[in-house]
Image (cartoon, rainbow, N blue to C red):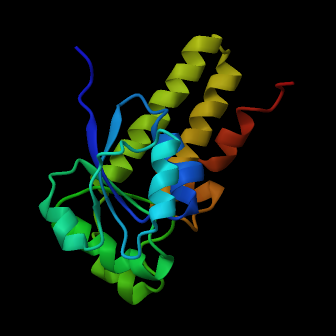
Amino acid sequence: MPAAQLQTLVVGTGDRIERVLLPALSTVSAPVRVTAICDLGPSDQRITALTNDGLVNPETPVFTDLDQALDAGPYDMAVLTQPNDQHHTIALRLAEYGIPVWREEWFAFHSGQAADGPTAKTEAEEAIQEHANAGADLVIDALDLGDRDTDLINLVVNAACHVSEQPEASFDAMVRAKYDTDPNEVRDWWDGWS
């Protein structure tokens, strides 16, 4: 049975959506379908480029009003690429609808805005961590790696997941949080390996 498609709302049609984000989404194991596009200042040229590149179906509705786009849902996720100064307001609006958000930049410019956002791990963060772990498993299984390389891949995945939660975290703080052990012990795992 094929996996259900993730109904996705794209909010913003900047250059990164075409060059980076939609191509990246096309490679994930769960099929992603752009169900609607919302851009507060849409460019017909941008929409045409997304369509010509096969990233968006020509029949995909395009909205210039976020509320209209939200009413056209439901959506399993949203990709947020509006200008940075709009991320906070739009991300909160999407959260009100319970839509996990994948964004290209931060949700907030300052701590006052950050305090408005959710404090718990979002479904989107959990999904990203799940996919990072699945990607690590895919590489580890396909390459039949030894313990050293497997441990290193897992360490990188754990570090990436930790930094997604705490961007200013140090290596030592990540190790304590993810491994519940002394960071020097983890460093010692690679002593003697060549």
Image quadrant containing the C terminus: top right
Residue 176 seen in the figure: no
| Quadrant of residue 169 within the rendered picture | bottom right
Query: Where residue 20 sits in the image (x, y, percent)?
Result: 57, 50
Query: Where residue 10 sits in the image (x, y, percent)?
Result: 36, 57
- 190 relative position to 33: left or right: right
The residue under the point 82% across, 25% down is 193
Instruction: Residue lying at the far right in this picture: please name it.
Output: 194
Nearer to the camera, 185 or 141: 141
What is the total number of numbered labels drawn onto the structure image? 0
Instruction: Examine the rendered structure and indicate whether residue 136 appears above or below residue 182.
Output: above
Query: Where residue 83 sits in the image (x, y, percent)?
Result: 49, 76
Instruction: Examine the rendered structure and indicate whether residue 92 appears above or below residue 57.
Output: below
Residue 151 seen in the figure: yes
| Quadrant of residue 2 within the rendered picture | top left
Image quadrant containing the N terminus: top left
The residue under the point 21% across, 64% down is 69
Instruction: Residue lying at the far bottom in this picture: please name it.
Output: 112
- 176 relative position to 38: left or right: right
Nearer to the camera, 149 or 51: 51
The residue under the point 69% across, 46% down is 184
Query: Where residue 4 sits in the image (x, y, percent)?
Result: 23, 29
- 95 relative position to 52: left or right: left
The residue under the point 23% across, 47% down is 76
Nearer to the camera, 169 or 71: 71
